[in-house]
């Protein structure tokens, strides 16, 4: 059946009515989309994610260490510095990617320095006579040069410089607190040994007796070793947080008790804990000299754990001990 002129007109009018909303929407979006595009072009782009960068020419570096630094995108106006020292066979970039310190720096705005050892085996020198005295030479001098570089170039706060490390890096943490109590305010050592325990005089970097936990001294003797690294120094001493697994077969567990003796003596704290608790399953935490998060000495024993620290969540505990999360 054919449509009459009237019905055809009605159909055309109806079609125009149906098309009107589409035309209006098209017109509206035709104007809005270019406006949105221009606004997006004018709006600031998100800040680029921070990355690990190598720094060269950072100062006196007698053992040819390499320096890597991580400056978070939201770095504080007057940032703290954390030196994070790797294990044997490791590197600064490996410790950066394998630990949580960089993500904590993103959260709290501090700068992380990751030194890299370059000698065979990639262990740090915690054994030579040069390494065990203030400005004596070797790796500690190079690491402190890194700190001074960041203080100078990043407007960092010299009253908030900290150090942490695992295994060889934990031993270096002990060494740096002995050598440079004027530079570091606190340390956190994951599976280390006391300052001076790994000392050798034959050029070797390995001390089997210390590693096996068979070197024992009185608290006074250990304290004298640490104090003797910087003769004449009478200023404040850095606080120390110690971590160790009871099943560690590389740097055996008795070293943990020897470290506690050393640093309680250095800091004038009783060897009797001020508090003992278990913040997580299989953890036993003892605090010496005070009971809060910033006690002079804090020691965490991890039941059944070997030479594998820090584990997840432990870095955050170190940051709390330093006070960098406040």
Image (tube, rainbow, N blue to C red):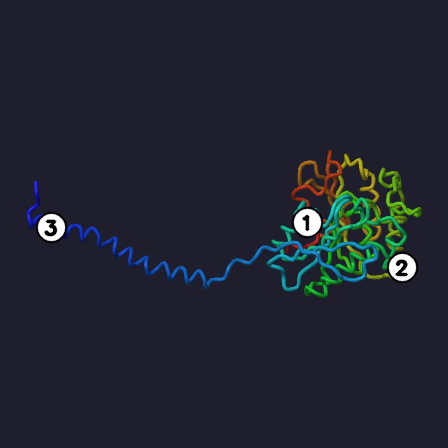
* The quarter of the displayed image where residue 249 is located: top right
Picture layout, residue 306 above or below residue 73: above
Mark 1 vs 3, N-terminal side: 3
Q: Position of residue 77 (x, y in %)?
A: 63, 64
Label 1 close to label 3 by CB (< 8 Å): no
Q: Position of residue 182 (x, y in %)?
A: 80, 60
Q: Residues within 10 Å of mark 2 (few under 14, many from 20)?
A: few
Q: Is residue 251 left or right of residue 200?
A: left
> Which residue in the rendered view is the most extreme toward the front?
2
Q: Position of residue 22 (x, y in %)?
A: 25, 53
The alpha-carbon separation of the residues under discs 1 and 3 comes to 75 Å
**Along the line of sight, the residue nearer the viewer: 4 or 144:** 4
Residue at 37% from the left image edge and 61% from the top image edge: 34
**Along the line of sight, the residue nearer the viewer: 1 or 159:** 1
**Along the line of sight, the residue nearer the viewer: 54 or 278:** 54
Q: Which mark is residue 96?
A: 1
Numbered disc in front, either 3 or 2: 3
Q: Which mark is residue 10?
A: 3
State the SS at label 3. Answer: helix
Picture layout, residue 84 above or below residue 246: below
Residue at 75% from the left image edge and 38% from the top image edge: 307
The alpha-carbon separation of the residues under discs 3 and 2 comes to 106 Å
Q: Residues within 10 Å of mark 3 (few under 14, many from 20)?
A: few
Q: Position of residue 19 (x, y in %)?
A: 22, 52
State the SS at label 2. Answer: loop
State the SS at label 1. Answer: helix
Numbered disc in front, either 2 or 1: 1
**According to the image, label 2 marks what residue?**
231
Numbered disc in front, either 1 or 3: 3
Q: Is residue 202 left or right of residue 140?
A: right
Mark 3 vs 2, N-terminal side: 3
């Amino acid at each position: 059946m054919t449509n009459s002129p009237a019905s055809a007109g009605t159909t055309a009018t109806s079609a125009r009515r149906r098309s009107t909303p589409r035309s209006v929407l098209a017109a509206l979006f035709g104007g809005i989309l270019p406006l949105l595009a221009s606004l997006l072009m004018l709006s600031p782009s998100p800040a680029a994610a921070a990355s690990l960068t190598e720094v060269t020419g950072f100062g006196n570096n007698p053992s040819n260490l390499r320096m890597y630094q991580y400056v978070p995108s939201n770095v504080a106006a007057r940032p703290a510095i954390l030196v994070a020292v790797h294990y044997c066979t490791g590197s600064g970039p490996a410790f950066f990617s394998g630990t949580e310190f960089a993500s904590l720096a993103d959260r709290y705005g501090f700068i992380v320095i990751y030194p890299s050892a370059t000698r065979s085996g990639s262990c740090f020198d915690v054994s030579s006579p040069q390494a065990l005295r203030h400005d004596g030479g070797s790796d500690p001098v190079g690491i402190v040069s890194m700190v001074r570089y960041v203080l100078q170039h990043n407007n960092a706060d010299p009253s908030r410089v900290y150090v942490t490390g695992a295994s060889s890096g934990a031993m270096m943490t002990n060494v740096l607190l002995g050598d440079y109590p004027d530079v570091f305010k606190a340390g956190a050592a994951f599976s280390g040994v006391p300052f001076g325990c790994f000392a050798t005089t034959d050029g070797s970097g390995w001390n089997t007796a210390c590693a096996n936990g068979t070197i024992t001294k009185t608290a006074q003797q250990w304290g004298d070793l640490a104090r003797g690294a910087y003769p004449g120094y009478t200023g404040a001493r850095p606080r120390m947080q110690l971590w160790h697994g009871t099943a560690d077969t590389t740097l055996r567990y008795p070293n943990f008790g020897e470290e506690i003796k050393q640093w309680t003596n250095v800091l004038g704290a009783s060897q009797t804990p001020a508090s003992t608790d278990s913040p997580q399953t299989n953890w036993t935490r003892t605090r010496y000299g005070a009971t809060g998060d910033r006690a002079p000495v804090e020691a965490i024993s991890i039941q059944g754990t070997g030479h594998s620290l820090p584990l997840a969540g432990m870095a955050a505990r170190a940051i709390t001990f330093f006070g960098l999360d406040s």
